[in-house]
Image (tube, grey):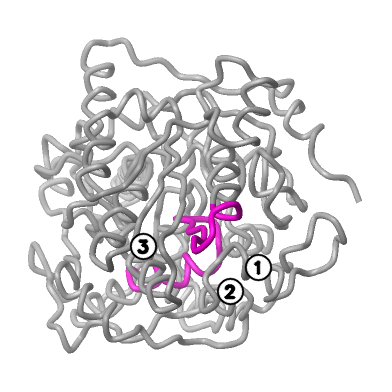
C-alpha cells in the first residue's frame, strides 16, 4: 500500500467545483419537512420568508446529485482550501497500532472550523438576493464566527444568538464575532417573544441550540430584508459540507487508499454528513463497504437514545417539523463543553441512514473525550476542539482494537476545528474538575412527552 506523506494538499485544480447531494443516491429518501399547522410538506413559498431563495431550492431538492459551486464562493474557498489530509504517524506509533489513521483538518481558517464552508455559501446567496443581512444561532461559537466572517466579506449585517452557557464560557469567541461586525446576544434573551417565553418556562436556563434557533428565526421574520441561516441539521448545509468528504476521497485516491472506517462527531450532523457523503455513496452503490460511525455526547444522545419521529427543529416550535432522531425539542442539554453538539435532534439525512443501518452511532462521556483530546494534542501537536475530540476518542478506540486483532485498517476521521477558544474547558479538565452527566430515562421522557403526536 502506498504511504501518504504527513500532509497531503490537493492542487487548486483538484479541488471539487461542485457540492454533492447525497440524497440523490439514497435508496430511501429523508422524509419531507412538514408545515406544523397543516402537517403537509412545506413548499418553496412557505420557506422563502425564512431562507434565501436559492437555499430553499437546495433544501427541497433530493434528486439533483451535484450543484455547481458559484465562482465567488470558489474564490473565497481558495483562501483556505483545499484543506489538508494528515496521516497521524505519531499517534499510530504511540498507540502501537497497525492501523493507518488519517484525519481531514478543517481548522485552518479564522473561524477555526469547517463551518465557513457553508457560511460563505449562504452569505453569497443572501448578497445575490439583495438582502440587508442575516440572523443565526451558534452553540460553541464556530458557526457564529463563520457567519460574521462571511457577512463581513460580502458587506452584510449579521445578528448572532449565542447559547447562553457558551456566551459566558467563551468571551473571546464572542469578541471575534464582534470584530467581524456581528451583533451577539446570549440566548435565551428578552429581545424576542420566543426568548421571553422560554425564560418564563425554564428560569435560569443555560440555553440550547434549539432555543437560539427559535430566537434567530423570529428575528429574521420580524426584520425586513433579513433571512435566517443555519449551520447544521439542514440538508442544504450537509450539501455545502460535502466538500470535506470529496476532498478527502480525492486525496486518498491519489495513494490508492480506501477507508475501512470513517468517523465524525455528531451534533446536528453537518460535518459528519459532509465527511461521509462520497464514501456513503460508494457504500450504497456497492463499490466499497466502510464502517461509518457517528460519535455523540452521552449528555445529548439523540441517535443512541432518541426517537425517530417528526419533531420541531427548535425549542420555540416556530420552525417546520423534521423526521429525525430526536430527544424532543423541549429537551435542554446539560452545560457540557462541546457546545456545538448540544442539539436535541439530528440531520434528517443522517437519521434516515442510521435507521436504515447504513451507519452506526456511539455516545461518549465528556471526561473520556478530553482524555483523548489531551492525548492527541501532546502527540500530534494540534489542540482539538471538544466537538472534534469525540471523533478522536473513537478513532483511538478503533485503532486499539486493530492492535488487538493485528488488522491494518485505514481509519479516517474529521478534525473539525481547533480548541484555542475552549481553554476554559481544558482548564476544568487539567484541574480535575470536569464531570460527566448522562441523562436518566426519566430526564429523556420529559423531552419525549412534548413531541408532536399525529
> Disc 3 or 2, which lies upstream in sequence?
2
Residue labelled with disc 1 = 47
In which image quadrant can residue 279 be found?
Answer: bottom left
Where does residue 234 sit, x and y in percent of width and height? 55, 62
Q: Residue at x 87, y 61 (%)?
A: 38
Please tell me whether mark 2 sits on a helix, a strand or a loop.
Answer: helix
In which image quadrant can residue 240 be found?
Answer: bottom left
The answer to whether one can see residue 64 in this image is yes
Contact? badges 1 and 2 (CB < 8 Å)? yes
Nearer the viewer's eye, disc 3 or disc 1?
Answer: 1
Horizontal arrangement in the rendering, residue 168 relative to residue 186 (left or right): left
Q: Residue at x 41, y 68 (%)?
A: 122
Residue labelled with disc 2 = 56
Please tell me whether mark 1 sits on a helix, a strand or a loop.
Answer: helix
Residue 377 shown in magenta: no
Residue 239 shown in magenta: yes
- Mark 2 Cα shell of 10 Å, populated few (<14), some (14-19), many (≥20): some
Q: Residue at x 15, y 83 (%)?
A: 12
What separation in Å lies between label 1 and label 2 (alpha carbons)? 6 Å
Magenta stretch? 220-244
Where does residue 414 sit, x and y in percent of width and height? 32, 56
- Mark 1 Cα shell of 10 Å, populated few (<14), some (14-19), many (≥20): some
Task: Give the label on residue 119, or none.
Answer: 3
Q: Residue furthest front?
A: 224
The vertical placement of 124 against 275, above or below, is below
Amino acid at each position: 500500500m502506498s504511504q501518504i506523506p504527513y500532509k497531503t494538499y490537493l492542487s487548486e485544480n483538484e479541488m471539487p467545483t461542485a457540492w454533492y447531494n447525497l440524497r440523490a443516491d439514497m435508496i430511501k429518501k429523508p422524509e419531507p419537512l412538514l408545515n406544523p399547522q397543516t402537517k403537509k410538506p412545506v413548499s418553496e413559498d412557505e420557506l422563502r420568508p425564512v431562507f434565501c431563495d436559492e437555499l430553499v431550492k437546495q433544501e427541497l431538492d433530493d434528486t439533483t446529485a451535484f450543484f455547481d459551486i458559484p465562482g465567488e464562493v470558489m474564490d473565497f474557498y481558495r483562501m483556505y482550501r483545499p484543506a489538508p489530509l494528515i496521516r497521524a504517524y505519531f499517534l499510530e506509533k504511540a498507540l502501537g497500532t497497525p492501523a493507518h489513521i488519517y484525519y481531514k483538518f478543517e481548522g485552518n481558517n479564522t473561524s477555526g472550523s469547517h463551518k465557513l464552508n457553508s457560511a460563505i455559501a449562504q452569505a453569497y446567496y443572501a448578497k445575490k438576493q439583495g438582502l440587508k443581512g442575516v440572523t443565526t444561532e451558534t452553540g460553541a461559537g464556530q458557526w457564529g464566527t463563520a457567519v460574521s466572517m462571511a457577512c463581513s466579506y460580502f458587506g452584510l449585517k449579521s445578528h448572532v444568538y449565542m447559547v447562553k452557557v457558551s456566551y459566558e464560557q467563551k468571551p473571546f469567541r464572542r469578541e471575534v464575532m464582534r470584530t467581524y461586525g456581528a451583533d451577539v446576544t446570549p440566548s435565551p434573551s428578552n429581545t424576542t417573544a420566543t426568548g421571553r417565553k422560554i425564560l418564563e418556562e425554564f428560569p435560569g436556563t443555560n440555553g440550547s441550540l434549539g432555543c437560539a434557533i427559535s430566537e434567530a428565526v423570529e428575528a429574521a421574520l420580524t426584520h425586513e430584508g433579513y433571512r435566517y441561516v443555519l449551520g447544521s441539521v439542514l440538508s442544504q448545509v450537509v450539501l455545502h459540507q460535502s466538500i470535506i468528504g470529496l476532498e478527502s476521497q480525492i486525496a486518498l485516491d491519489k495513494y490508492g487508499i480506501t477507508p475501512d472506517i470513517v468517523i465524525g462527531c455528531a451534533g446536528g450532523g453537518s460535518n459528519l454528513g459532509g465527511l461521509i457523503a462520497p464514501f456513503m455513496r460508494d457504500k450504497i452503490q456497492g463499490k466499497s463497504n466502510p464502517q461509518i460511525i457517528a460519535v455523540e455526547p452521552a449528555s445529548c444522545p439523540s441517535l443512541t437514545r432518541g426517537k425517530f419521529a417528526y419533531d420541531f427543529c427548535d425549542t420555540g416550535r416556530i420552525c417546520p417539523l423534521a423526521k429525525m432522531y430526536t430527544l424532543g425539542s423541549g429537551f435542554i442539554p446539560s452545560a457540557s463543553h462541546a457546545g456545538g453538539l448540544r442539539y436535541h435532534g439530528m440531520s434528517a439525512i443522517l437519521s434516515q441512514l442510521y435507521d436504515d443501518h447504513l451507519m452506526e452511532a456511539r455516545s461518549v462521556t465528556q471526561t473520556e473525550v478530553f482524555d483523548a483530546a489531551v492525548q492527541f494534542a501532546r502527540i500530534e501537536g494540534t489542540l482539538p476542539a471538544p466537538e472534534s475530540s469525540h471523533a478522536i476518542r473513537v478513532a483511538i478506540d478503533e485503532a486499539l482494537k486493530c492492535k488487538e486483532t493485528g488488522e491494518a485498517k485505514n481509519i479516517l476521521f474529521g478534525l473539525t476545528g481547533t480548541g484555542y477558544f475552549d481553554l476554559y474547558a481544558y482548564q476544568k479538565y487539567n484541574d480535575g474538575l470536569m464531570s460527566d452527566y448522562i441523562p436518566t430515562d426519566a430526564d429523556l421522557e420529559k423531552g419525549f412527552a412534548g413531541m408532536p403526536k399525529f
